[in-house]
Every structure is written in structure tokens, then in C-alpha cells.
Amino acid sequence: MTLRRVRLRPETGAAALTAAFAKIRAENEVPDEFPPEVLAEAQEAARSTTPPERDETGVEFITIDPPGSKDLDQALAIDADGSGYRVRYAIADVPAFVAPGGAVDLEARRRVQTLYLPDGRSPLHPAVLSEGAASLLPDSERSAYVWDLRLDADAVVAETQVYRARVRSRAQLDYASVQADLDAGRAPRVIELLAQVGPRRIDLELARGGASLPMPEQEVHVEGSGPDAVYRLRYRPPAPVEDYNAQISLLTGMAAADLMLQGGVGILRTMPPPDEKAVSRFRRVVAAHGLSWPQEQSYGAFLRGLDRTDPVHLAIIHEATGLFRGAGYTPFDGTRPEQVEHAAVAAAYAHVTAPLRRLVDRFGLAACAALSAGEEVPDWVRAALPELPEIMRAGDRRASAIERACTDAVEAAELHDQVGQEFAAVVVDDRGEKGYVVALIDPAIVAPCRRPEGAAAPAAGDAVRVRLLEADIEARRVSFEIAGR
């Protein structure tokens, strides 16, 4: 929810960065090729899996993903339904292709999730499934779990069903073109309705105290080549339609959690609320940047008002990630868990919308379909529930370490030709003898900073000028010293 994606533009030949990414892969044991037995089982599953009897190929589903995506987990259809809406959200039927305890299952438990680096990715499942038989590619009949959600005029869920069916996506769209069509008034009906449902769901999120933090994607641009290459970070802020689409995924995850809690079995994605220390620290950063945050306004509402194209606001968004910590997975079978809520969602929530890229979703989907039909949750799902939290925790740790290491390398590349220069910054943390953490105003980088001997000690929240001491791409290290006020 809070990860920043860093993307290396295909036309750039950034040798120093690609070497750093290769080192990151090795350090984090990023899986490479799939073992032969996994590929063989996946190929057989793609060839022989029987589709469900229920036929919903007449529903006009579409997908919205980044350009070039082939692992398509979700397809969307929205229709007017009286004064409300009918949302059908088709999710890739990964359970149909993965035999419990088989080679693909065991390998997926080892990989846990698709891992993203700026110059490539390590997929959770073999391409014959993730980019072929299980992917909701356009103009192809596919098996899917269909979430059939009836919403009232305010986009509040009135009824939920989930079932397996055959579907056919009509088009593979990307966010930029969809947003352009929407702005120009030429979007298809499903997108027009998405632009109605999305804002209503955002209003509901704010009303219940929820918060979203969609981080802008960082793109690495390289000017020149070899030792004289200059790296520049550019942010790509998310388009409004990306937020609307994310609300459909959140809506589905909340419906899944409700089914699980009513049925007494499942696995939730939970997160505690931020503690007062974290909120106070974040308020200091906001105040230091000269922004107003009324005491009575929730942090979710405040974050919604930030401009992701403004460098100062980007620094604040980056610092807000400290409010989104402690997320985990909570399984239960028979006894309702004490912790059911995800603080950022401000509701019970479960992961079920990305089974091609995240292990736990496969189990949640199968559980919800059984519960919706009034059937017993499969034994293979129940048996896995106690194991999944630690498996997912380990996978999340690796993904976070990779994301952080790649960001560090990219930030060092951004600054490597500016050693000795000064930047405007704000002190966001005082670590005593270990020095400080500062957030640069532009570029939006957070880094360690020391205080020269004899210099006045700043306090957290102070605006300062800092001098860049080091920007080492290979070591993935950036450091500053305070140069003045």
C-alpha cells in the first residue's frame, strides 16, 4: 500500500544502476528461472484445466493496467442498477491451475509474491499461467472468480456474491489513455460509471476515517553515458482513474473480509492505527513545510488534499509512510480474532484481488467462493491458514528490502554528480548521537545527516540547508551534513 515503484526507462543504458540492481538481486536471493518440474506441471495445467460451467462471457469486462502488462489479475464491468450500481469484478482463477501440494504450489510458497525491480521482475507463477492461461487477457475465454456486488446510490454495498465463471475481457486499457478519454468526454460507459463509483467510495473512505497513500512512480532518466552519465528522477503521479480503480479493489477486499467474518474462517489483512508519536512526528514535518493541518482533520483527509506534483508535498507523502506500519495477516477458523480492522482502510479487509502476483489471495478466493455458496471451505485452504502469516511476512520483508535498496541506488544516482552542493531540507528526526534524518525539498529524498562539530543543533521540524557529502551508487548510500539555517 505504501511501496514506491522505481522504473528504469527502457531506452536508458544505465550501466551503474543495472549493476546495482544485479547486486540487489543476489543479496536478496531473488528467484530466477523456474525448476523444470514446476514448468512441466504448469504447462500441463494450462493444457488440461476444465473451465467452469457458468458462462458470463456476455458481460463486457475490461482490464486497466500499466502499458505492456500481461499478468492481468482483474477485469471490471459496471452497470447502472436502478438508482445504484452493479459492479462485477472478475479475478484470475489461479486455484484452478494450482494443485495443492504440487510443484507449482510449493514453488509459489517459496516465492510468495512477484518481485519488482526497476529493470525487471521475478514472477510468482510461470509465464504459461501468469501471462497465459490464467491471465485475463483480452478476447480470450478465461476462468475467473466473479465478485458480483450490488451497490446503492451512495456506492454502499447492499449484496455480495462470488462464484466461478467463464469470462471474456473486451479490451486491455491503460491508465493514461483511460484518463485522457475520460477528460475528453469520450470514455466508454464502464469508465463513466467507474468515475461515478470511485469518488463515492473515496467519500465513504474518508467518512469512516480511512487513508490511502498511492505513492508516485519514480522513473529514472539518464542523460549521457558511461562515467559521465547523469541520472535524473522524475515522478509520475497517479491519474485519478487509478485511484478509482484501486477503490474497486478495496471494495472487493472489504466484501471478502465480511464474508470470512460471517463464515467464521479466513485470513484478514490487518494493521494497527499509527501511534501518537508517529502522528506527532508527521505533524512536525507538515508544519515545517508551512502546510496547515487542522487538529480535527484526519490524516487520511489531509493526505487526500496533497498535490503529488508538488516537490514539497512529495516529501510529506514520503514521510507519511511512517503512519502505515505494522500490517500483517490474521488467520482464524472458528474463533473471531481480536484484531480484525486494517487501520488505513478503517474496516476489515482481505487480500483476494491479485492471485497471479500474491500467494495469499489464492486461498482467500477459494474460501470466499465456498462461503458465498454455503459450502465448506476446502481442506487445503484451512490447512494452510496457520502457515500463511509467516510465509507472507517473510515475502513482504524481502519485497520491502528490495524496494528500499533499489530506491537508495536510484537516489544515489540522482545525486552522484552533485557532491558538495547544498539543498534546502527539513529535519524529520533527531537520532541523538547517530545524527539526524532530513527530507530534501527538491528532489524528494530522505537521508541521514550529521552535524559538524561546533554547529548549532537543530530540532526536529527545523528548516535547514544541507551539504551533500556522498552519493555512492554501488554502495547505495547518500549522506549530508548540516550547512546552515
Image: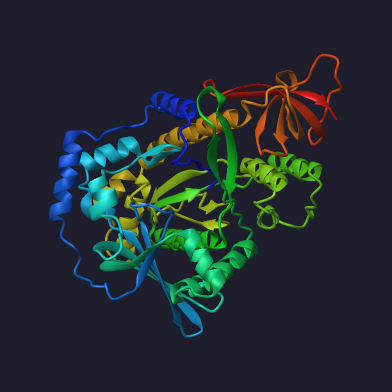
Q: Quadrant of the C terminus?
A: top right
Extreme residue toward the top, this view? 453
The answer to whether 290 appears left or right of 314 in the picture is right
Q: Is residue 27 visible?
A: yes
Q: At x 29% / y 62%, what residue is drawn?
A: 144
Q: At x 67% / y 38%, what residue is drawn?
A: 443
Between 415 and 439, the residue placed more toward the observer is 415
Residue 164: percent from the left, percent from the top?
27, 65
The answer to whether 360 appears left or right of 42 in the picture is right
What count of labels does the image hold?
0
Display colour scheme: rainbow
Residue 448: percent from the left, percent from the top?
68, 26
Position above or below: 366 against 197: above
Q: At x 49% / y 25%, what residue is drawn?
A: 16
Q: Is residue 373 visible?
A: no
The answer to whether 370 appears left or right of 82 in the picture is left
Between 261 and 58, the residue placed more toward the observer is 58
Between 153 and 384, the residue placed more toward the observer is 153
Residue 293: percent from the left, percent from the top?
78, 53
Residue 446: percent from the left, percent from the top?
66, 33
The answer to whether 452 appears left or right of 416 in the picture is right
Position above or below: 469 against 34: above
Between 329 and 132, the residue placed more toward the observer is 132
Position above or below: 191 against 237: below
